[in-house]
Image: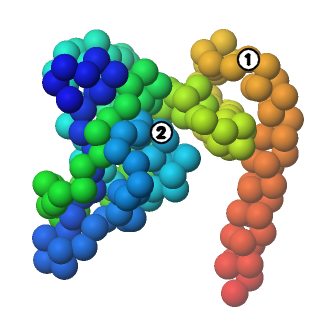
Amino acid sequence: IKENKNISGIIGNRWIPKSNKVIGTEMPKDIEYASGLELYQKFGFKGDTLRLYKTEVLKKFLFPKIEGEKFIYENVVFDIIDSKYKMLINRDKLYYCDYLEDGYTVNAKKLKKENPIGYAYALNSGVKYSLTIRRKIKWTVLYIEWCKKNKIENAYNNFCNPLLYIIMYIPATIYIIGKEVKRNAKDNKKIKK
């Protein structure tokens, strides 16, 4: 892959050491090259991946720095790379890992809350690089909901697809109100008990 300028690196499964099982689904057997976006959205892959990138590719796509925030989701960079390159699919057992009790997965909600602009940026990236309109709509609703909830300024101006934002603003607002009504009804039931 070193000489192939269309390949950004290698992608493969992560494995659990104790059980020797894959985290998620195994890599598709009938393809040799795909982007991460294609793996998840086109080929139905689920789970965590090992990603090994060529140094020169990673140097082209740096993580943005957001003042006052310390974390940003990796999809912000992965999505850009995936939109420009494919990866060699590896089916060997190269990466064994365990989840930490206080790690990234467990602390996802806390990380979002402490880094609201970074999370909005990741949602926006999800819209921009989604391969289907259905996913673009889903990520747009999540983006609008997140920005309203966290009072993020210039949400519309910073969004990658202004027309989609306008089209989805009212449905997203109805969705947000519906969630709030449902949450309040649930809380009222708990109080009555």
Residue at 72% over, 37% down: 133
- At which x and y percent is residue 39? 45, 47
Farthest bottom residue?
193
Q: Which residue is mark 1?
A: 162
- At which x and y percent is residue 49? 30, 50
How crowded is the residue under tag 2: few (<14 C-alpha within 10 Å), some, or many (20+)?
Answer: many
For residue 39, side relative to residue 16 (left or right): right
* 150 shown above or below 6: below
Q: Which residue is mark 2?
A: 37
Q: Secondary structure at mark 2?
A: helix
- At which x and y percent is residue 4? 25, 22
Residue 65 image-quadrant placement: top left
Q: Secondary structure at mark 1?
A: helix
Q: Is residue 70 visible?
A: no
Sequence-wise first label, 1 or 2: 2
* 108 shown above or below 53: below
Q: Is residue 144 visible?
A: yes
Residue 185 image-quadrant placement: bottom right
Q: Nearer the viewer, residue 192 or 29?
A: 29
- At which x and y percent is residue 10? 24, 39
Which amino acid, mark 1? Pro
Applied colour scheme: rainbow
Residue 99 image-quadrant placement: bottom left
For residue 152, side relative to residue 180 (left or right): left
Residue at 21% over, 64% down: 15
Which amino acid, mark 2? Leu
Cα separation, mark 1 vs mark 2, equals: 22 Å
